[in-house]
Amino acid sequence: ELKVEQNPLFLSMQEEKNYTIYCNYSTTSDRLYWYRQDPGKSLESLFVLLSNGAVKQEGRLMASLDTKARLSTLHITAAVHDLSATYFCAVDPSYTGANSKLTFGKGITLSVRP
Amino acid sequence: NAGVMQNPRHLVRRRGQEARLRCSPMKGHSHVYWYRQLPEEGLKFMVYLQKENIIDESGMPKERFSAEFPKEGPSILRIQQVVRGDSAAYFCASSPQDRVRNEQFFGPGTRLTVL
């Protein structure tokens, strides 16, 4: 059974500092997704990582995927309050090239303080 | 282009009643997924449907839960004889026929409360 682990589960960040959060998964996959969720809201798609070594950047966030290590990182540059939210990674383990379900981690709640 | 639509947004039921949750996928999307989120947890997959077909229901409880995606109209997740443990947020996602990306877009969710 595929397991997706995120750590830490909660991170208090200081404004303008840099941080990295992690997503590990237990079986081979080359499709990984990052989502953001604000309290009481739905999930917003942030990044789609489709191959080993993939790197995507959007604003202060940069995501990368190492399929050999089964690890994705989300790097935050110069944190700002607007980034406070819960961030989920999700893995699609299918190799058929078909659409399929995603397995989610528990999420990491980021809180940016002045 | 409207996003994934779900209704109702909030639903309150008493134990033993039925809950019906609806999901209309994004225009052009033929794949629908239902997930459940308990407080302080990630999303757990329940069922994956295409029009008139259940593709994967491995996450669906064997009793009381059913899902459909008819040829016309929204996808429906039905929970019969609800119990307090069914209280959760239920999210629907849809994706286009894109086997490479399989990017799923989520609706606003239905928050079910069982009294």
Image: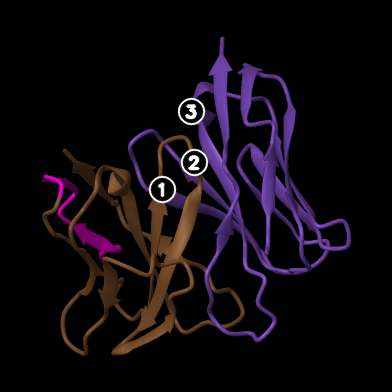
Chain colours: A purple, B brown
Q: CA distance from mark 1 to mark 2?
A: 6 Å
Camera-nearest residue between B47 and A70 = B47
The residue at which mark 2 appears reads as B41
Say above or below: B35 vs A111.
Answer: below
Seen at 16% across and 86% down, the residue is B72
Q: Residues within 10 Å of mark 1 (few under 14, many from 20)?
A: some
Camera-nearest residue between A92 and B88 = B88
Seen at 63% across and 37% down, the residue is A60
Q: Is residue B64 left or right of residue A114?
A: left
The residue at which mark 1 appears reads as B37
Say above or below: A105 vs B45.
Answer: above
Q: Which mark is residue B48?
A: none
Q: Is residue B50 left or right of residue A64?
A: left
Q: Which residues are magenta?
A: B1-15
Residue B1: image quadrant is bottom left
Q: Position of residue B23 (x, y in %)?
A: 24, 67
Camera-nearest residue between A14 and B59 = B59
Q: Chain of mark 1?
A: B
The residue at which mark 3 appears reads as A82
Q: Tell whether label 2 touches label 1 (CB within 8 Å).
A: yes
Seen at 52% across and 82% down, the residue is B98
